[in-house]
Amino acid sequence: MFQLRRCHPIACVIALGLAGILAGQTADPLAGAMAEELLPQLKPILQRALERSPEQVRRAIEIEQAEARSMVSKAIMLPNLGGYGRYAVNRAATASAASSATSNSSGFFYDVGISQPVYHWGALKAQLEIDRIGEKIARREFADAARLLAAQLRKSYLELVAKKGAQRAEKRGLELAAKGLAREEERFKNRETTPGDITTARNLFQEAQLRFDRSVAEYGFMKRVFARLAGIDELPDEAIPAGLPRPVPLADHGQALLRDFLRGGAVETFRGQVFALGVLQSDLNYSIAKTGLLPKFSFNAGHNVSNVTQADITQVRQEAIVQNTFGLLVNWTIFDSGATRGRRLEALAKKRSYERQLQTYVEATGDLAQYLRQQAEFASRALDFSENRLGGARTGVEQARESLSRGRASADDVERAEAGLLGAEAENAAVRAEFLNRWTEFVSLVGADPAMKNLPPRYVR
């Protein structure tokens, strides 16, 4: 739980949002309804991709940059020690109308100083807090990118599964077209058909061959795109099943997720937290801008050693001078031609911009969540229709085989029925994939994606 004292309103919202997300990640009631549970080959790919994909690697670098900026801001508040040194040979000379004198001297010259900011009206501390919030923003953006990546990987993988199933049907159709062409050619040799029939059979075969070749090329391209997106070197064909198990819609649970999401607001999502954190940053930038025309106090101390040579007509003097300084340094910009006022106005404008973005995002995301929930219901209904058609195709194959055993149908009739079943299975796989895609989009948007458990806690706290 979060314990807040004098909690800023936006900070309270962020804390409550984080608590909601973390609480949602402890329980996993959706695991059995996700694509990676139906297709176990996908789960390890998802786990690796959240860390190794090119996009996530880039986001991780941005987190490192934000952490480095915080280190710089913290260092400014701490003592700064520096100095210089040199060894020099000096030649001094003096001349007049009566006489002249020269001298050579050498020695080591150095200066060491230390400085420490004392009081800058909270500007340095505010800048450090801004950079620390920047770290949180970078981590939330990493987590949101991971959420979108998981959804995209599921969608692409399901498309591969559906494509592989469709390819089986197309291959079977090609085999039947080849047998049909061979049968027509044999009949033509026996003068049982016309050249037009052969031409028709040959066109059907060539069209089937084109569909199959195109499908093979598309399938290979889709595999390469998926592997690059997931950050893996190669996706072997055996890692993609030829069929997709029937998903089980969770209508009641989906309605509960939607209700909780609309009650809590989209500010609980990673993207919503980014906008809310931007509001906090703008407040801190405004507090820094207000100090632009105020004096800044710093402490400094120094130790300096130098050699001084003085020559005149009668003598040459060389002296070593040691200086120790301690003091309070004041830097005060009294008039800056309106620059401070401009910075204050810029900070206020950024705050209003983030607030507007947050409000717009909350409203638009609420509408999108309801739309995706509705689309998942439509996909569920389409899934029922497709399952019925698939059952009809299977019954047709059984009837064709029974008719063949009784002499009422030919082997060609059975092959056509089996080809029709493969087509129905391919169509059904596409419908199942569509349902899972719609369901995944909804679950991901409302912050209930089980894949987010694979993220280290520092990205969501």
Image (cartoon, rainbow, N blue to C red):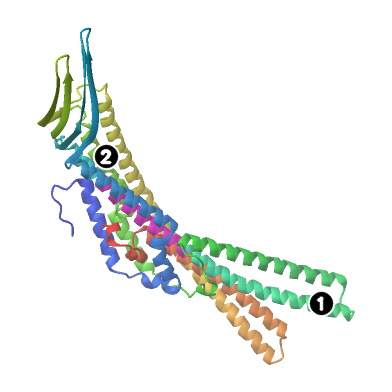
Rate crowding at label 1 as few (under 14), some (14 to 19) or many (20 or more) other CA atoms within 10 Å. Answer: many
Which residue in the structure is indicated by mark 2?
282
Where does the magenta region start and end? Answer: 131-154
> Amino acid type of disc 2?
Ser
Q: Secondary structure at mark 2?
A: helix
For the residue pair 175 and 71, the one nearer the viewer reads as 71
Q: Is residue 29 left or right of residue 236?
A: left
User: Given the image, on which type of amino acid does mark 1 rest?
Assistant: Glu
- Quarter assignment of residue 297: top left
> In the rendered image, which quarter contains the C terminus?
bottom left
Residue 440 percent coordinates (x, y): 42, 63
> Is 43 positioned to the left or the right of 263 in the image?
right
Q: Percent x, y for residue 442?
A: 40, 60
Q: Residue at the location (27% across, 31% down)? A: 343
**Residue at image coords 58%, 78%:** 392
Which residue is situated farthest in the right direction here?
Answer: 191
Residue 307 against residue 184 in the figure, above or below: above
Q: Residue at x 48, y 60 (%)?
A: 229
Magenta stretch contains residue 402: no
Q: 137 above or below 310?
A: below
Residue carrying label 1: 184
- Residue at 36% x, 65% y is 451
